[in-house]
Amino acid sequence: MILAAARNDTIRSLVATAPVSRDVVSRFVAGETTADAVAATRRLVDSGLAVTLDYLGEDTTDAIQAANTVDAYVELLEHLHAENLADRAEVSVKLSAVGQLLDEKLALDNAARICRAAQAAGTTVTLDMEDHTTTDSTLRVLGELRRTWPWVGAVLQAYLRRTVDDATRLATEGSRVRLCKGAYSEPETVAYPDTAEVDKSYVRCVNALLAGEGYPMFATHDPRLIRIIGERARVHGREPGGFEYQMLFGIRPEEQLRLARLGNTVRVYVPYGGEWYGYLMRRMAERPANTMFFLRAVMTR
Ligand code: FAD
């Protein structure tokens, strides 16, 4: 039902103009334009947080649209540089938004353009991870990009059975790895169906990343996991600057500030752009837990 609504233009315009949904959307999405994204970044940075920006759009099957997405990132990076925000703000890129469904080489070339612009701006790029059918391709592209830009970040999803091995393999010097639980609906053959198993896997991956030599970026809002990450970081002798916490824009903002005030690096993932409707609807349709996730945030405002 949600996916049908996501494709229906009448419902889309009703949702887009209803005051309540505009309120909800502005809670989770920074706005539609580069200026909106830069303004949100400025506010977060001024409050002591770091930022990673995601230009919304995914599953592109059109090379021109993929090129437009690259242009949007390049424009954003130029603005971050001009506004002296690039030392606190980087970008997150979904390879499916820059052509991965069409051709891996096209996605690689497009991602390389974004990396070149990030290098010129003085910041970094992290490749978001999408559903499990893309994991190997995304890690291949990551490997290629890292030959030139070793700071390109990876994302690993704790719900995948393979991830602890990927975490161990990627935890090398200079690597940046974001660990999240995972947001897509996946078959039991590849992913743990049970949330308790996902949490256990998350902790195994926390240990693997902290034991390695890379820079771990722990993306979660889960209070229990945040506590465990802090404890494990101490055991592994990591100072606050030796790893970071990451959370989504609009989710647990007080907790973001609390962790930052303790001296931790806390990075907020900020989505922006015109494709917010599909983004929110698809996230909710993919996994019932995602609907609960957004509803919980609205209830706890
Ligand atoms: P959940 O299991 O959703 O929640 C656990 C507990 O956290 C809850 O029981 C509650 O106590 C607390 N909590 C959660 N939400 C709230 C709230 N709104 N208010 C108060 N308490 C709350 N997924 C991908 O698949 N690929 C990616 O590239 C990716 N990148 C991400 C980047 C960042 C920075 C973040 C934060 C997430 C990313 N995700 C990504 C999404 C991620 O995989 C999860 O779907 C999402 O973060 C929800 O999982 P969780 O760890 O926060 O805990």
Image (cartoon, rainbow, N blue to C red):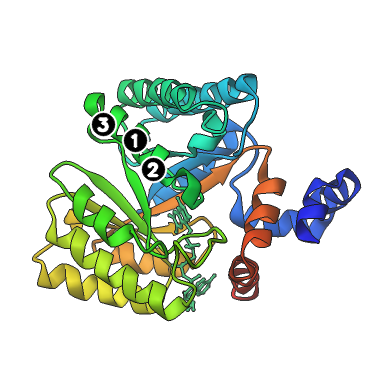
Disc 1 marks which amino acid?
Answer: Arg
- Residue 163, by quadrant, is bottom left
User: Disc 1 marks which residue?
Assistant: 140
| Separation (CA) of disc 3 from disc 1 | 10 Å
Q: Position of residue 194 (x, y in %)?
A: 47, 77
Query: Which class describes the residues within 10 Å of circle 3: few (<14), some (14-19), or many (20+)?
Result: some
Residue under numbered circle 3: 146
The residue indicated by pointer 2 is: 136
**Which residue occupies the foreground of this view, 102 or 54?**
102
Q: How many marks?
A: 3
What's the residue type where badge 3 is placed?
Arg
Q: Secondary structure at mark 3?
A: helix
Return the x and y of residue 229 as percentages of the image width and height.
26, 70
Q: Quote the CA–CA distance across marks 1 and 2.
A: 6 Å
At mark 2, the secondary structure is helix
| Residue 126 in sight | yes
C-alpha distance separating marks 2 and 3: 15 Å
Residue at mark 3: C-beta within 8 A of ligand 1: no
| Amino acid identity at mark 2 | Asp
Residue at far left of view: 237
Q: Give above or below for 93 relative to 164.
A: above
Q: Nearer the viewer, mark 2 or mark 3?
A: 2
Work out whether mark 3 precedes mark 1 in sequence or the reverse, and give the earlier one: 1
Whether disc 2's CB lies below 8 Å from ligand 1 is answered no
In terms of depth relative to the viewer, which is nearer, 32 or 105? 105
Query: Does residue 170 appear to the left or right of 104 in the view shown?
Result: left
